[in-house]
Image (cartoon, grey):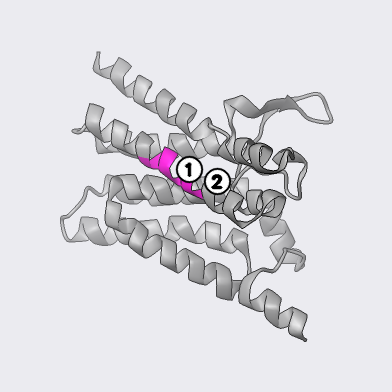
Amino acid sequence: MQILAILGVVILAYLLGSLPSGLILVKLISGKDIRAVESGRTGGTNAMRAAGFWAGIGTALIDLLKATLAVWVAREIVPAFPWVHVLAGLGAILGHNHSIFLMERNERGRLRLRGGAGGAPAVGAALGLWPPSILIILPLAVLILYFGGYASIATLSVGVIAVAIFAYRAGIGSSPWTYMFYGLLAEVVLLWTLRPNIRRLLKGTERLVGFRARKKKAV
């Protein structure tokens, strides 16, 4: 029964993460298919490009909360297994990035699962593991976005910050060391998903935003 409970928690986390909030909100607000806009991803950044500021904020908030809910469900059903809490968070991120509801064939005829980049659900899962983490991760990620100038770098920072938070908390005995591995594994998932962005960063062609973008326009 315990194995079935764990399996059910992980599947539910994936399905929650798979809910394509960006696709739905952008369609309702603007009538556009977000998959045909800019990067084609369904997260908050692309939703903002497709349908404006509030569409982006709404998408990011829902994407964050669906991962939080996945972790909370895991903690409620299997409270004694912190590694399952970690898997629930990762499952939500993977569902968001590779949604079962966004299955399609690529130009070669192969099936693929589309979705977002994983930043918002990565924050949400950390929130589920330790609620005050959002008060650290979110402001730092916003600062990195605004002053660093790249949404992809801000997204990648989430896993790194989570590692630091949960390593510190484990070191003082406030949370299990298992939670630190959430940050590490989340970072691996984010790195894998953002491979195209990383290539553009290396080429110097990644889109600039925030302070650096304004400064460049002013020049």
Question: Mark 2–mark 1 contact, CB under 8 Å?
Answer: yes
Residue under pointer 2 = 59
Would residue 29 be visible to someone looking at this image? yes
Residue identified by numbered label 1: 62
Give the extent of the magenta segment: 60-68
Say which element carries label 1: helix
Q: Is residue 78 visible?
A: no
Using the rendered view, name the quadrant where residue 90 is placed: top left
User: In the image, 53: left or right of 179?
Assistant: right
Residue at the spot 53% in from the left edge and 58% down from the top edge: 156
Q: Horizontal and vertical percent for residue 70?
A: 37, 34
At mark 2, the secondary structure is helix
Q: In this view, does 130 lie to the left or right of 219?
A: left
Which amino acid, mark 2?
Answer: Thr
Separation of disc 2 and disc 1 at Cα?
Answer: 5 Å
- Which of the 4 image quadrants contains residue 10? top left
